[in-house]
């Protein structure tokens, strides 16, 4: 099936239902959303785009993003979403690797891309786009098979050139149905707010909201502004949004300082990086039981495990802290296992690589058989993450395998040290990395963003009260902020480079 058929169904059932908003203003009904997407699909066909061809979207969060995406899908094309914060040359490399035929862009990005890219680039605020949405439409969505590609998502490329994750219609259907079963309910009265990049998980979460006829709200700012989010939530009500843990922390800090209650926020799904226990406890204390955690990767989008709102907010269970430190249990459409370095299964409580298989797992990387063979083995996706499963199925992440510190032959997981340091009242943010050591192999170093002047002796004493002596940092470095990528993930590679200069 073509995942875009969900829009067609909703539009035919209730064409006057409000669909897309820019801030507080309604700009599209489901009927007009559907009609414009069909027109874009027809325009793409007249410009030689055939089913299976790749069409890029290098845009900021705008209402036109959804129309371009569904237009490409209606035409049977594969969408290549590109983070709007990338350099034009980086975007051009992705489009070339994907062998894309065309790309939709937005103001400020069009020139940056068109200057370094020789394929047609269409600004969705320009005259060509106006022609496209007025074009003779296709009659209906192009039929596609469940195994056909619909989204070609490029990884962040922290260890080299990004790889294209092949995402099929089946994978997105599995993700959406698992969302209903394991993450949250969606009704036509709900509202999806896109404050994180639509090129990633926040954007692909549109499909279940389209199916249910929910509203889609694009902030006028085009991104994450705390005051704007609170205002939109109050105005629209029943708001769902996806947020990285750093975004949740910022919302809590602003709300606590300003007295915002979070009125209108129904569900915040968080994931994409480590959520520290102290941060989510503070968030729940302020906003109430509105949080759900998910764990996924581009290779299994948003769909490995989930920790329900009840489990996130529960403080009565005897093991609530351990559960809150986990990423929940396997979502309904996948299996999760822990394996050793030889791929052999480990027992409950043993630490190893997290493996996942099921309908939400990618078939492989785009035109990269070598990387696919290393990552998907006998149907199991090797995530590269290290963790353990409890006897009752809760998965706890330790770290990325590449971030684990081995000191004196003993494994040290940076997240455990970070969790301990974050309970100190002076610590705002912290990131722990390994530093080469001539005798022990590596030792532990902490980069700390602190309130006021950093007191290393106090931090050392604090760690010694909470974790084993060998795990405590041997050095602390004060920073005004931690280096992060566009999604709020701390760039430990940058911290390691800083150490080389210290």
Image (tube, rainbow, N blue to C red):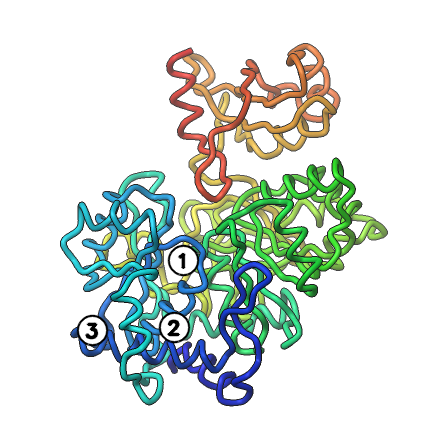
**Residue drawn at (20%, 73%), measured in percent from left and top?**
49
* Real-space CA distance between mark 2 and mark 1, rounded to the nearest whole angstrom: 22 Å
Q: Earlier in the sequence, mark 2 or mark 1?
A: 2
Pick the front one: 458 or 92: 92
* Res 421 → quadrant: top right
Q: Which mark is in front, 3 or 1? A: 3
Is mark 3 in CB contact (under 8 Å) with mark 2?
A: no
Residue 418 x/y as whole percent:
61, 30
Residue picked out by circle 2: 70
Answer above or below: position of 307 versus 238. Answer: above
Classify mark 2: helix, strand or loop.
helix
Mark 2 crowdedness (10 Å alpha carbons): few <14, some 14-19, many ≥20:
many
Residue 459: where, in percent of width, then height? 68, 17
Name the residue tied to disc 3: 49
Q: Position of residue 500 (x, y in %)?
A: 38, 16
Q: CA distance from mark 3 to mark 1?
A: 26 Å
Work out whether 299 lies above or below 421.
below
Q: Are marks 3 and 1 in contact (CB under 8 Å)?
A: no
How far apart marks 3 and 2 lie (CA) works out to 14 Å
Task: Name the residue carrying label 1.
Answer: 299
For the point 63% across and 61% down, the residue is: 240
N-terminal of the two: label 3 or label 2?
Answer: 3
Marks 2/1 in contact by CB < 8 Å: the verdict is no
Horizontal side, residue 389 vs residue 45: left or right: right
- Which of the two discs, 2 and 1, sits closer to the camera? 2
Crowd tier of the residue under label 1, counting other residues whose Cα lies within 10 Å: few below 14, some 14–19, many 20 or above: many
Q: Position of residue 411 (x, y in %)?
A: 53, 31
- Is residue 149 placed above or below 431 in the rendered structure? below
Tell me where residue 361 sits by quadrant. bottom left
């Amino acid at each position: 099936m073509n995942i875009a058929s969900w829009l067609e169904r909703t539009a035919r059932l209730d064409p006057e239902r409000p669909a897309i908003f820019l801030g507080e203003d309604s700009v599209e009904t489901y009927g007009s959303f559907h009609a414009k997407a069909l027109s874009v699909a027809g325009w793409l066909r007249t410009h030689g785009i055939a089913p299976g061809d790749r069409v890029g979207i290098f845009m900021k969060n705008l209402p036109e993003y959804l129309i371009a995406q569904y237009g490409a899908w209606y035409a049977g094309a594969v969408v290549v979403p590109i983070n709007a914060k990338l350099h034009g040359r980086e975007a051009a490399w992705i489009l070339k690797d994907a062998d894309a035929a065309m790309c939709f862009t937005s103001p400020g990005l069009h020139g940056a891309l068109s200057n370094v890219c020789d394929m047609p680039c269409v600004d969705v605020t320009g005259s060509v786009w106006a022609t496209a949405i007025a074009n003779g439409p296709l009659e209906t969505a192009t039929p596609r098979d469940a195994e056909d590609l619909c989204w070609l998502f490029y990884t962040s490329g922290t260890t080299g050139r990004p790889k294209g994750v092949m995402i099929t219609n089946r994978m997105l259907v599995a993700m959406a149905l698992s969302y209903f079963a394991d993450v949250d309910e969606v009704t036509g009265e709900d509202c999806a707010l896109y404050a994180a990049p639509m090129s990633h998980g926040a954007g692909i979460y549109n499909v279940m909201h389209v199916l249910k006829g929910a509203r889609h709200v694009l902030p006028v700012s085009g991104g994450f502004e705390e005051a704007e989010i609170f205002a939109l939530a109050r105005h629209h009500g029943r708001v769902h949004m996806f947020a990285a843990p750093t975004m949740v922390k910022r919302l809590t800090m602003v709300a606590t300082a300003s007295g915002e209650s979070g009125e209108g926020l129904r569900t915040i799904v968080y994931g994409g990086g480590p959520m520290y226990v102290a941060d989510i406890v503070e968030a729940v204390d302020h906003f109430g039981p509105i949080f759900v955690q998910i764990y996924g990767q581009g290779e299994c989008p948003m769909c490995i495990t989930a920790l329900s709102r009840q489990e996130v907010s529960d403080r009565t269970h005897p093991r609530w802290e351990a559960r809150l430190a986990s990423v929940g249990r396997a979502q309904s459409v996948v299996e999760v296992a822990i394996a050793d370095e030889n791929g052999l299964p480990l027992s409950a409580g043993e630490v190893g690589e997290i493996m996942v298989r099921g309908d939400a797992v990618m078939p492989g990387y785009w035109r990269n058989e070598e990387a696919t063979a290393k990552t998907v083995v006998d149907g199991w996706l090797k995530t590269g993450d290290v963790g353990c499963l409890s006897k009752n199925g809760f998965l706890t992440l330790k770290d990325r395998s590449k971030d684990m510190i081995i000191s004196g032959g003993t494994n040290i997981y940076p997240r455990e040290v970070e969790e301990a340091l974050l309970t100190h009242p002076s610590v705002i943010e912290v990131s722990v990395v390994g530093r080469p050591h001539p005798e022990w192999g590596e030792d532990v170093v902490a980069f700390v963003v602190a309130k006021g002047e950093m007191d290393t002796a106090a931090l050392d004493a604090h760690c010694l009260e909470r974790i084993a002596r060998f795990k405590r940092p041997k050095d602390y470095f004060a920073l005004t902020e931690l280096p992060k990528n566009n999604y709020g993930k701390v760039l430990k590679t940058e911290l390691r480079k800083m150490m080389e200069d210290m």
